[in-house]
Amino acid sequence: MPGRLTDKVAIVTGASSGIGRAISLHYASEGAKLVCADLQPAPLDSPNEPPTHELIASTGGTAIFHPTDVSDATQVSQLVATAAAHYGRLDIMVNNAGIGVAAAAPIWDLALADWERMQAVNLSGVFHGIKFASAQMLRQPPHASGDRGWIINAASILGLAGQSGVAAYCAAKGGVVNLTRAAALDCAPQRIHVNAFAPGYTGTAMTANFFGDEGTRGQLEGMHPFRGLGEPEDLARVCVFLASEDARWVTGATIPVDGGFMA
Ligand code: NAI
């Protein structure tokens, strides 16, 4: 039986670890051909595990790795060009790469360099992906469905509400939410979907530090009405939907995937 993404070519940024790795594996199992983009091929939390593209290839899927720093516009432009050269087109762009906050600090103690790096990766990185992917989608014939492409951005519950000590992260993710809306309006006449997902606290390398502390973990579990924490696969399943024809009438949306955190 064909998968839900058969014949689609997808780039996933931050594909080596956590949510991006789960999205890549789900996309491959649904028939997509992948370009896995990241700073390094190895997963952050388990460097001895095979890189995502090798894991996909070992299970009969199609994937290559392309080293990319999403904060660098030239590198993202080259990433998109690589996908188009290797597979002949680009249908899906998942702007998932992101960094967390190393140490929480009130805004008066927030270092300028930390603010700037956060915006460069978590907000400008998403902008670069939308800009170069949409330009490629306009250069190629539409997908057989009639749509020209599917762009999916990693936001956060902290882009929908504030939290003390992490203002730079909240600002970048809030930017992603409204960038998604505005880009969706630019792209709608061309039938390019632009949507975002907003994870609640999810078990990955990004959260490993505070999930390791039983007290903090219990507190975070209690903040999610479903009582627990998200898993990368929870986001991956929503990203399959957002890249499929099932999302025919969905654009400009940010979907919370958070066990009810934002309810
Ligand atoms: P993670 O830390 O497990 O994985 C992030 C991946 O992005 C890593 O492989 C890393 O090497 C890569 N990366 C970092 N900077 C990069 C750059 N400049 N260029 C290219 N790749 C880069 O993180 P996780 O948890 O999988 O997060 C994925 C996305 O989901 C991020 O945008 C994050 O902000 C967002 N998110 C995660 C939440 C969580 O609780 N884990 C909650 C809300 C949002």
Image (cartoon, rainbow, N blue to C red):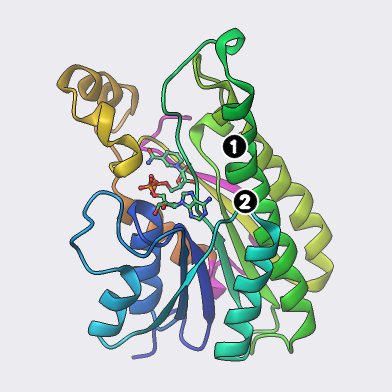
Proximity of marks 1 and 2: CB atoms separated by less than 8 Å: yes
Q: Circle 1 — which element? A: helix
Q: Disc 2 designates what residue?
A: 71
112 relative to 230 in the view: left or right? right
Whether 245 is among the magenta residues is: yes
Q: Residue at x 40, y 84 (%)?
A: 31
Give the magenta part as a residue range: 243-263
Position in image of residue 197 (x %, y %): 52, 49
Residue 227 visible in image: no
Looking at the picture, tell me which residue is in the foreground, 186 or 250. 186
Looking at the picture, tell me which residue is in the foreground, 102 or 154. 102
Image vertical order of residue 172 relative to residue 153, above or below: above
Residue 157 visible in image: yes
Position in image of residue 32 (x %, y %): 45, 81
Binning the other alpha carbons within 10 Å of mark 1 as few (below 14), some (14 to 19) or many (20 upward) gives: some
Ligand 1 within 8 Å of disc 2? The answer is yes
Position in image of residue 94 (x %, y %): 54, 62
Q: Of label 1 and label 2, which has the lower sequence position?
A: 2
Q: Amino acid at mark 2?
A: Ser
Q: Residue at x 78, y 83 (%)?
A: 139
Position in image of residue 191 (x %, y %): 75, 72
Q: Residue at x 29, y 68 (%)?
A: 51
128 relative to 21 in the view: left or right? right
Image vertical order of residue 20 relative to residue 212, above or below: below
Binning the other alpha carbons within 10 Å of mark 2 as few (below 14), some (14 to 19) or many (20 upward) gives: many
Q: Amino acid at mark 1?
A: Arg
Quadrant of the image containing the N terminus: bottom left
Q: Residue at x 53, y 10 (%)?
A: 106
Q: Disc 1 designates what residue?
A: 117
